[in-house]
Every structure is written in C-alpha cells, then in structure tokens.
Image (spheres, helix red, strand yellow):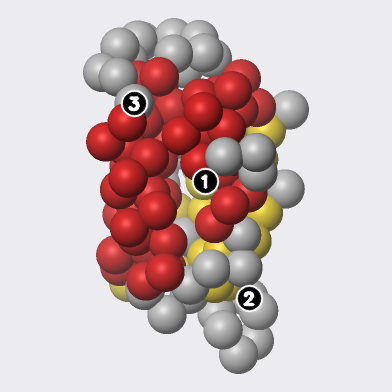
Amino acid sequence: MSYDIALHEPVTGDVIELDDTHHIKGSNYVIGGTRDAWLSVTYNYSKHFRKVMGDDGIRTIYSMTGAESIPVIEDAISQLGDDATDDYWESTEGNAKKALKGLLVFAKLRPDGVWDGD
C-alpha cells in the first residue's frame, strides 16, 4: 500500500503537469519519467512521518499549497536521519527523507498547487 500524493491545479483540481519530465521515484513510478507532480510513497515510512509531522504524518500537507508546505517539509527533512538504503521498501528515516525531498521539489516548482493524496 502507498500514499499517492500529488499537487493539483488550484482551479481545475487536475494533477499538475510540470514543464519537464522528472524521474523522482516512489513505490510506483513511470518508466521513462513523467511530467505529473505525483509521487507514490510507501506506507512503510508512516511512523517516520508521524514522528516529525505529528499524528497526521504526511497527510499534514494535504490541502496546503506548495508554498505553505515548503517550511513543513523542510522542517521534517531536517529532523530525519541520513540512513537511506538501496532497498526502497525498508522503513528507514533516510528513505522517508528521500521521499520528502521529492515532494519538496514539486512544491518549489509549483508553489500554487494544492496537495492531495491517498
């Protein structure tokens, strides 16, 4: 299972399409990349998200704009360790941090977008 998290156009509600293809990978990803501001993040990281973002975990950013979420995501990133592994599914702080860094890229590219997920 995973969180499917995306930035949406504030008026239409459609998932934002970025100008360029990206290769930010999560638990599911598009071979060859995608322009969608979307990331699938495994639930395996949920305890790390709750530790640094509170009871709502990653869902804390849902309904926030990209701009509003930037300081929240940056703060969470600063609190997590650097123990990322080559095993995406392993529940480490570093792997959770890597996912947050991907979301931060989207937020900075489209600060007007609105987060939604699940």
Amino acid residing under circle 2: Asp
Number of numbered tags placed on the structure image = 3
Q: Kindly identify which numbered label has been placed on residue 14.
A: 2
Which residue was labeled with disc 3? 80
At 65% across and 79% down in the image, what residue appears? 13
At 57% across and 32% down in the image, what residue appears? 50
Q: Residues within 10 Å of mark 2 (few under 14, many from 20)?
A: some
Mark 3 vs mark 2, foreground winner is 3
Locate residue 35 relative to residue 62 in the image: left or right: left
Please tell me whether residue 8 is drawn above or below residue 48 in the rendered image: below
Please tell me whether residue 59 is drawn above or below residue 36 in the rendered image: above
Q: Secondary structure at mark 2?
A: loop
Tell me whether circle 1 and circle 2 mark residues in contact (CB < 8 Å): no
State the residue in front, 35 or 69: 69
Q: Position of residue 43 (x, y in %)?
A: 65, 27
How far apart marks 1 and 3 lie (CA) works out to 19 Å
Locate residue 16 relative to residue 105 in the image: left or right: right
Q: Position of residue 75 (x, y in %)?
A: 32, 45
Q: Position of residue 90 (x, y in %)?
A: 50, 10
Tell me whether circle 1 and circle 3 mark residues in contact (CB < 8 Å): no
Say if residue 15 shows up in the picture. no
Amino acid residing under circle 3: Leu
Q: Secondary structure at mark 1?
A: strand
Q: Residues within 10 Å of mark 1 (few under 14, many from 20)?
A: many
How far apart marks 1 and 2 lie (CA) works out to 15 Å
Amino acid residing under circle 1: Leu
At 30% across and 48% down in the image, what residue appears? 74
Please tell me whether residue 71 is drawn above or below residue 59 in the rendered image: below
State the residue in front, 81 or 106: 81
Say if residue 50 shows up in the picture. yes
Which residue was labeled with disc 1? 39
